[in-house]
Amino acid sequence: MLEVKDLDVFYGGIHALKGINFEINEGEIVTLIGSNGAGKTTILNVISGVVKQKNGDVIFQNEKINNLTTEKIVELGIIHVPEGRRIFTALNVEENLLMGAYLRNDKKEIQEDLENVYELFPRLRERRTQMGGTLSGGEQQMLAIGRALMSKPRLLMLDEPSMGLAPIIVQEIYETIEKLNEERNLTVLLVEQNANLALQVAHQAYVIETGEIVLQGTGRELLGDDRVRKAYLGEE
Amino acid sequence: MGNLIDVLIKLSIATVILYFVIKILSKGFDKITDMIVAMDKEKNRKLIYLIVGILLVLPFLLSRYPYILRTSIMAIMYVVLALSLNFVLGFAGQLSMGHAAFYGIGAYVTALLMVNFNVPFLLAFIASAIVAGIFGFLLGVPTLRLKGDYLAITTIGFGEILRLVLVNWVEVTRGPAGIPGIPSPSFFGFTINNNIGYYYIILLLAFFTVFVSNRLLNSRLGQGFIAVRDDEIAAEAMGINSTYLKILAFVLGAAIAGMAGSFFATFVHYVNPDNFTYMESVTILCMVVLGGLGSIPGVILGAIVLTVLPEALRGIALYRYAIYGLLLILMMINRPGGMINMDRLKGGRKDENSRGSRSNKVLRRSYSSR
């Protein structure tokens, strides 16, 4: 579904991504794990058109999307839930969700999708008229995911959905991600520092270190891998 | 020395009195805001009809008081100017401090066209809007990469450059001498030559501006503005084209300020560079901030208060601007969100459900700066 080929990105003189290659098949959960500054978020930013690569291609449904604007990329069905949730604090919950459907014109289906999001996150329905800024961290993450779903994505890119959340909420968020993947066949690209969690749900996983993929395999394989256990799971 | 102490004592007393006056006024503004928020569609419409009705008959009631009528015209003109800045500052969240430049461009375009080429007012008016809009675009594009303070400085620079061009390009603008003898506007043979006529022209323009602001805020585009203002990265991630929205805000704001300038030129029959200084930009900015960023009723009220206040304070001559400044400072300390700040009500109330069904979307979706 999505193929990233020989991606090179520079920030000024810093070679941030050094020839990244990976592939996502439809219906998979793929995760990119790695420490701070490894380049995980940069990969998402390139795919969503925020950062431009120097070399390499991003191919979605057999078409190059390298030179498209973010707007066009969202229209194609790739949505990026940025790190730190970034919900609109001056809009209420429902208005936030509707912002996700900004590029859509099918009013009736937007209403249906709104219902779907409320079914997925009943907490959001309870708080539909509450301002985005007054929600708890977990609710904000639900809202951020719900908002992304409102764009009718085919590929959902999540950047650190567990960041700063209580373990019990993280569990809930991850259950929802798996549910979306299983029930709606939504393809997910997950960026995480919480490697243990991400590897448990991922079909395919890549370990990134200083701009390079150093290891890849299924989530289960990497969970069992010694190097991963040492570097990312804190085991001796 | 004794004189200075005397002044300081008087000002201190004034500060204390004003502080309490504003405390009381603040309660009043809260009541008004509550009232607007609680109002249903029917009542809201009735109130708007009532206000429009009063505005329509006002010049006849004031025909014996030419000074008050003239002040009303200026107040309404500043409502238009403040609302035009509100597109840039309130909706798109761009701190533009050179707004008087667009107002000046509009005024000079109309003045030059009408004086030199006998162009009819309506054409000159449209030309003013277009030229100002083009300059809005020209300023908007390079400043997109700038934020906050840097943008403010750049826009101040733009305003100053415009003023210097007006002063120094003597062959065209006649420099500091300005352009006198701008004819009165005429429509299809009728010439507007009294203040009642001018009143209706500017009232029409104000209605137009409020209408556009209102429609914009209620549209998807308007929500996009709020989203961009709130969090540009998140807005971009949703596929909102923030570049387009910001330029649109600049162009709209500039074009409407240009219209106000065009009106101003024919109203006073004389323009010179002193009308469009940095201070003018700051005054307009104060109106928007004092009224409540992004809140349409707030900005309208802010413009009226800041136009009427200096006039009303003429009685105390010397202390006029000291009091004016004090009022601004105390007001902002007391109500940092502006006089009518919808956000406050939107954010912290218990009756969530009734707010959800509230029909007055304009107000509901207004918001203020943090």
Image (cartoon, rainbow, N blue to C red):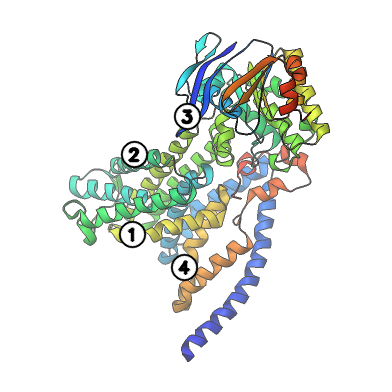
Say which residue appears at 21% left-offset and 53% top-offset. B173
Q: Are marks 1 and 3 in contact (CB under 8 Å)?
A: no
Q: Tell me where residue A28 appears, x and y as whole percent.
A: 69, 13
- Closer to us: mark 4 or mark 1? 1
Task: Give the number of the disc on residue A10.
Answer: 3
In primary-sequence order, the first of circles 4 and 1 is: 1
Residue that numbered label 1 is attached to:
B275
| Residue B95 visible somewhere in the drawing | yes
Camera-side residue of B32 and B184: B32
Provide the residue designation for mark 4: B310
Amino acid type at circle 2 is Ile
Left or right of B302 in this view: A142: right
- Residue B134's tag is 2
Q: Are marks 2 and 4 in contact (CB under 8 Å)?
A: no
| Tag 3 secondary structure | strand
Q: CA distance from mark 4 to mark 3?
A: 56 Å
Instruction: Tell me which chain the residue with mark 4 is part of.
Output: B
Dots 2 and 1 on the same chain:
yes
State if disc 3 and disc 4 touch (CB < 8 Å).
no
Label 2: chain letter: B
How far apart, in angstroms, are the residues tagged by discs 3 and 2? 36 Å
Badge 4 density bin: few <14, some 14–19, many ≥20, Cα 10 Å: some
Residue B123: quarter of image: top left
CA gap, disc 2 to disc 1? 21 Å
Circle 1 sits in a helix, a strand or a loop, which is it?
Answer: helix
